[in-house]
Amino acid sequence: MLPSKFLSWLIAVSMILLTLSSLSLHQFSNNSENSFIARSVFNFILVNNSSIYLKANGEYDQMKSPPSSPEMPRKEDTNIQEVPFQVSGHAMNMDETGQHSGAVCDQSRALLRVYMYDLPSEFHFGLLGWKGSANQTWPSVSIPNGFPPYPGGLNLQHSAEYWLTIDLLVSNTANIVRPCSVIRVQNSSEADVIFVPFFSSLSYNRHPKLQGHEKVSVNRMLQDKLVQFLKGRDEWKRLGGRDHLIVAHHPNSMLFARYKLGSAMFVLADFGRYPRKIANIEKDVIAPYKHMVRTVLIANSASFSERPTLIYFRGAIYRKDGGAIRQVLYHLLKDEKDVHFAFGSVQANGIKQAGKGMSSSKFCLNIAGDTPSSNRLFDAIASHCVPVIISDEIELPFEDVLDYSEFCVFVRASDAVKKGYLLNLLRGIEQENWTKMWERLKKISRHFEYQYPSQPGDAVDMIWQTVSRKKSATQLCVHRKNRYIRSQSS
């Protein structure tokens, strides 16, 4: 048996040698271009150690505890990355209070490098009444009051165009803390995506009709000018527009231009008014509506027993096309004692009443209207009311990384109109199963929040991540078309 003092001495010496070896390895990996441990691999080892994080200057530092944030996605959400600076693309360092310190995004590590056209203000903030000084294209976005707000009411639900544009403008600002999934570049040859900053939904909402002596509406005029501009750009000609990103969230926005710009990637609410050759899930991005009701704080979210209403619906009842089912369901459910099914609008405190009703209901109906989607789904999510989706043609935001069956109930339209079917189904969901969906709702609701500045895993960040995942499909299309072009020209 070895003496205990000798064993203690041996362990101490071993620890010192191990520490010196690690430091030598670290230094060697930094200084040697031919290191047998690649720098990227070494970084990966350190990144995945929860007690170490990367500083903005490339140095490593110890943390007292792993970084955590209520805004960060859970591990089960595939491709929604969890480590803060992995999501952001740069070292968003945390101090001891857990707050991020600002740093300009590292272009080489961003998921997306985006070039944005400097279109005249009439295409974007000019539609909000903003007028810059001479030669000023963009308002200041480094402070919250430096740019005009998006108009409220129903306009706001289609405001994705606004939030994405602001996020790009602020991406090179050092004093704004935001994820760096995307960074704006000044040279289009360095870009993965070319962003077209046209507030198309706002253009439709505000200028759809002829005014005064106009021969062409402002909305139509802007679309025609945009087509002419894009078709003349070398960036468009290079890939036929396939790497361009255009936001057309309102179903009636870009009605004239969409057929001429259909090779581009669109950010849409759904595909309800698009032919497949113009818009499809392979190339385009489905973005959430901005919810109208106030977000329910997790601490204030009512549980199963605290929600007296079983089923809630408030909205337009008489709709055309696929929305005709609303009228059928209204007559089936309107007299049930634990069901609230009524006409409602944004007028006369309608939004406030809807928020109150949803937050005190177990299930909220999301029924197809004139188009497959509606803002009602995202109001329900913000209220932590389990959505019941009755819309066979609906497309859902971020569905490649979010399993909606974990927090929604899906019912085929053909089943929903059967007498007693919907009531029996929802009354048959036990409290335990409802609570699981409710708990999941509280965790994923942050993915549907538009805000300034954007935060890891919020709606803006999730849209950019989705665009990033679409890149490979765009590249595949381009490469397949190049199969014979290059060989024939050589």
Image (cartoon, grey):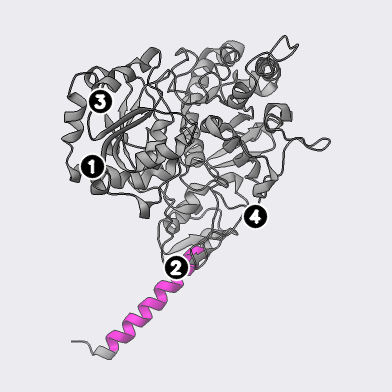
State the CA–CA distance, disc 1 to disc 3: 21 Å
Could you say where residue 40 lies in the image, as x and y percent from the top left?
49, 51
Residue depth check, mark 1 versus mark 3: number of the one nearer the observer: 3
User: Which of these two is toward me, 351 or 453?
Assistant: 351
Q: Residues within 10 Å of mark 4 (few under 14, many from 20)?
A: few
User: Which of these two is toward me, 423 or 75?
Assistant: 423
Residue depth check, mark 2 versus mark 4: number of the one nearer the observer: 4
Q: To which residue does mark 1 refer?
A: 434
Residue that appears at 40% across and 16% down: 319
Residue that appears at 35% across and 48% down: 75
Q: Is residue 40 above or below residue 160?
A: below
Residue that appears at 65% across and 41% down: 169
Q: Residues within 10 Å of mark 2 (few under 14, many from 20)?
A: few
Q: To which residue does mark 3 refer?
A: 333
Q: To which residue does mark 2 refer?
A: 22
Amino acid type at circle 4 is Asn
Q: Is residue 443 above or below residue 261?
A: below
Of pointers 4 and 1, the one earlier in the residue sequence? 4
Q: To which residue does mark 4 refer?
A: 175
Left/right of residue 476 with respect to residue 427 in the rendered view: right
Q: Is residue 46 above or below residue 279?
A: below
The verdict on residue 20 being magenta is yes
| Highlighted magenta segment, given as a residue range | 6-27
Assign a secondary structure to mark 2.
Answer: helix
Residue depth check, mark 4 versus mark 1: number of the one nearer the observer: 1
Amino acid type at circle 1 is Trp
Assign a secondary structure to mark 1.
Answer: helix
Of pointers 2 and 4, the one earlier in the residue sequence? 2
